[in-house]
Amino acid sequence: MKIDHSQPLEYGTHQNQMNILGFWIFLGAEIMLFGTLFASYFTLENGVGNGPSGAEIFEITPVLMETIILLTSSFTIGLATHAMRINNKKATLAFLAITLVLGLSFLSVEVYEFIHYYHVGATLQTSGFTAILLTTLGTHGAHVTFGLFWGFFILLQIKKRGFTPETTNKSFIFSLYWHFLDVVWIFIFSFIYLKGMM
Amino acid sequence: MEFFERFAIPHPSPLIYASMVAIGLTLIAIVIGITYFNKWGYLWREWLTTVDHKRIGIMYMISALLMLFRGGADAVMMRLQTAVPDNAFLDAQHYNEVFTTHGVVMIFFMAMAFVIGLMNFVVPLQIGARDVAFPRLNAISFWLYFAGAMLFNISFVIGGSPDAGWTNYFPLAGTDFSESVGVNYYMWSLQISGIGTLMTGINFIVTILKMRAPGMKLMKMPMFTWSALITNVIIVFAFPVLTIALLMGTFDRQFGTHFFASTNGGMDMLWANLFWVWGHPEVYILILPAFGIYSEIIATFSQRNLYGYKSMVGSMVIISFLSFLVWVHHFFTMGHGALVNGIFSITTMAIAVPTGIKIFNWLLTMWKGKIRFTVPMLYSLGFIPLFTIGGVTGVMLAIASADYQYHNTMFLVAHFHNVIIPGVVFAMLAGLTYWWPKMFGFMLNERIGKWGFWFLSIGFVFAFFPMYITGLDGQARRMYTYSEATGFGPLNMLSFFGAGLMAIAFALIVYNVYYSFRHSPRNVGMDPWNARSLEWATQNPVPEYNFAVTPVVNSSEAFWDSKKNGHQLFKDKITKIHMPNNSGMPIILAGFFFIFGFSFVFSIWIGVIVSALGILGTMAYRSFENDHGRYISEEEIKETEKEYGGAK
Amino acid sequence: MKLKLAFISFAILITTILAGCEPLLVLDPKGPQAETTANVIWLSIFTMAVIVIVVISMLVFIVYKYRASKQKEDYEPPHIEGNPIVESIIIGIPVLIVIFLSIVSVKSTYEVENIPEGYENQEPMVIYAASSNWKWHFSYPEQDIETLNYVILPTNRPIEFRLYSYGPITSFWIPQLAGQKYAMADMVTKINMVAEVPGDYAGRNANFSGKGFAENTFTATALSPDEFDKWVEEIQSTAKPLTEEKYEELLEPGHLGQMTFTGTHLEFKPAPEGENAGHHHGDADEEIERNDQEEGLEDHSNH
């Protein structure tokens, strides 16, 4: 395995470069995935049937909390990547751990939010609107959940194996994934919550 | 007992019971056969766990051929049922199931698989690579496809087949009107194989962008590789739309949501929109690789370079872009007014321009050439006029006002078979025959192959051209029968006759494989067709590592250059080669996906949870695995090369 | 011109022979809408036939002239890259054909969507056509009549069918009078037509809708205005009124013959239009907006 030391380690081998390119293309597919969800959301937004509309059920506090937590976690995963680049294992692990804890908190608030929707009578079965709302949020939430496991595995691997072409490559790709989920959330925040509450 | 009742077939008939017995006996025979010949170990080591793109490609093609026979049997049953008026061979419910499975199997599990199989086999060879970018992911793609295909096929004996058409429009596909688990099978089998296809898309884009031989710039890639690149870009952007549509459909059917319901704010036409936003690009996912195959074959057998290389590439790029902007033409009759219909009518017709460029480029490639009528070339020559007819009827359908009359009729059925069969099926058979010596080291018999071609082409004309006429006479598609007074009888009988000829053609093609396997000479050399592109610069059949030395390339016809213009392809010495290890993980993962899909279809939640844990566990195992591959030593390569007799 | 005539006679010959000497329904129009589409279809067949013939003649010529068996053993075909003039021709001509057909398409689509020429001054007669599994319910609000699986039309009067469905999407189609239009559960779509010749015309649901789809047909009968009025009078004096219970019974899945009632179901079960619509996505502007959104997203991700 040839390692090119003129580049950061995560780009150091040909396979690593291909992994990163492949992941960018995967994110392109993910954009289409969420794009389809958004397009369907805009189509069904007014299909409230006998159920509540967005303005009636959205609560600003948990949404703001989720937004702040996820934005912060995007920052900390950035710090983790930076620490990795300057070869600081301890800091990398710490920031990665903080990111995962923030991700977990985000999920907890989202679970709270879903319970709230359930109590105000906005379930998956209520109307076209609630179905697409919960599916869009749920798809994002499922991505975050998946990311928590994935990130945890990478954390363990860095701890055990240190910085190798594989571990740095994995954690860099994970950081791309995490930033991407943050971007999706910004769209959710603007086009679902803010638009709905206005 | 109640637990088991749901697995029963909702609409049984002697035909289905007979098939059940046949399937059971075949499976037992296969298991006994493999055990008797003691081949389980070989099968596991060499095929089921392989990550070699060539073997994965071959497995794709074998599965696709099996599916071709499943879908073909459906087709013959349909033509038999409609051959005479008021026929009672199939009842309405069975006919509905048969045309639904025919469409799904042919598009997803036959055509897609064949196209991906050929890409798998040929693309790394054409660009001078050792394998694809992510060999293990490639194996996962195949096994997910296979799991999806098997899941779909067992619907026929366990629980009932889907019956809402391959387009699966809601609310007909909702639980109100389609009560059996059939449509659940549709959702999950397509979901699982769709994930595999998406992974293939990513894999091949990276492979083509990052693993080309030194000197092979983008504009020096062989045309089939170009078509594969564009196809995979379309896959990556189109398949996520299907993923979401299927997810929403599953929720509607199994969790009582109202996405596509007509009450409580749902919208039935949302399904149709999402389906065709994926579905129209899908058509080009099938046809563009076919265009690539024809480009290779026509150039080879005209002994000329491909005319208008740049415009060939450009037209494919334009087609791929336009393919996302035409989906509304599948439901001009939905009632969104003349303006919207007009716009989509124009974008649709616009696709005829780049397609026309390609047709003329192929004609001009043959001009001043030296045309040899081999089997692959016959298919390509048959393709040009037949596909042109299919293409121009597509333009006729694109005229929105006229489409109000063609929509949902046999005219439409004739049109899309007229593009898919000469377009995709002919290309598959041409490509298979053309690359067969690369796969297996011997040629298919030309004489039997030519008989197959003529039966297929003439059968095709008889089977589908009458449908243009019955369509204009008001025969709607998907009718299980019609009365004698309609006058559709004679032409439908003609169609059945054509379908019979096509069935003979496929039997001949299979017989050809058997015959050639027994009788064809084995030492065909490196270049049996006098070909032009890089894949012919290595041995037949291709050794595991593809090229002993990485070739250096300076044109799109590198091999031709090396033959005629003294270009030196192999400059380096043989050194050890790094290869990926085989892995049992892909097939195990796909096994869990199969159980997951099956359990979900029947809402067996315990099975869903256990298999989901299995899937995540397999992925976690993969994450922690440390696998750096292996090396093939210099001596071993030299040994292999000597065996082939090719000293370099 | 001679060539065109030859074409026409050849095409007609083939089609008539194959169709058992009966004209094909779509090409045997009995009203202005179907006539427009029939003309467009003929026009496109001729245009496309020219393309097919050009391609096939080129193919036959080239394959015949440049076949290997005819050439010298040592003939080496030349290396030819693209030629800008040739390529502009093979781009230019298809572009011109597509522009021509685009104009035809847009113009004729507007024509068949609207009240046909010459009838603009008449108030169209409204008939509601609702499909249920696997029947067609026709309601005449003006005449206060409801029929099942058959519809009577006065000739030379514009008719506006308002379509909707109980259940699966269906497609309303009377090939000799006009092309199809979908009937859906949560909105009403409209189709305009005029019958100019009295007679019986086959009509059906053309969109697959389940088990009873094949027999989901009806007859459209065009009568002269006098006869039509007579028919209305006769029904009003002889038929029984349509009750809500009876209507619910009719909606059950199955096939029923032709039936006639006075009164319409619209009184107790209104069509999904106006305030009764499932949602408001029916109008064209919103449709475009939605399409734009989806396109926008694709563009976005393509870059």
Image: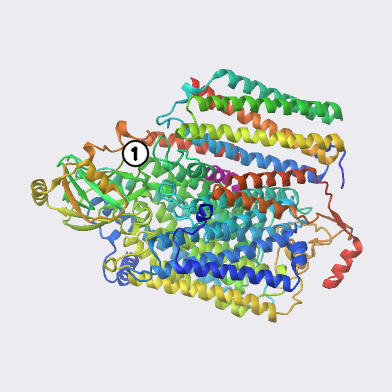
Count all numbered tags in the image, as a single digit.
Answer: 1
Pick whichever, B238 or B16, lies toward us: B16
Which quadrant of the rendered structure holds the N terminus of chain C? Answer: bottom left
Give the x, y percent position of residue A17.
Answer: 77, 42
Q: Which residue, given by chain and number where applicable, does mark 1 sit on?
A: C187
Pick whichever, B402 or B452, lies toward us: B452
Magenta stretch bounds: B233-246
Rendered residue at 19%/52% (across/down): C259
> Few, some or many C-alpha atoms within 10 Å of disc 1 (few <14, some 14-19, many ≥20)?
many
SS at mark 1 in the image: loop
Q: Picture quarter containing residue B32?
A: bottom right
Assess whether residue B357 is covered by the magenta stretch: no
Of all residues, the one furthest to the bottom in this rendering is B519
Give the x, y percent position of residue B351.
Answer: 49, 51
Of all residues, the one furthest to the top in this rendering is A61
Q: Is residue B417 above or below residue B189?
A: below
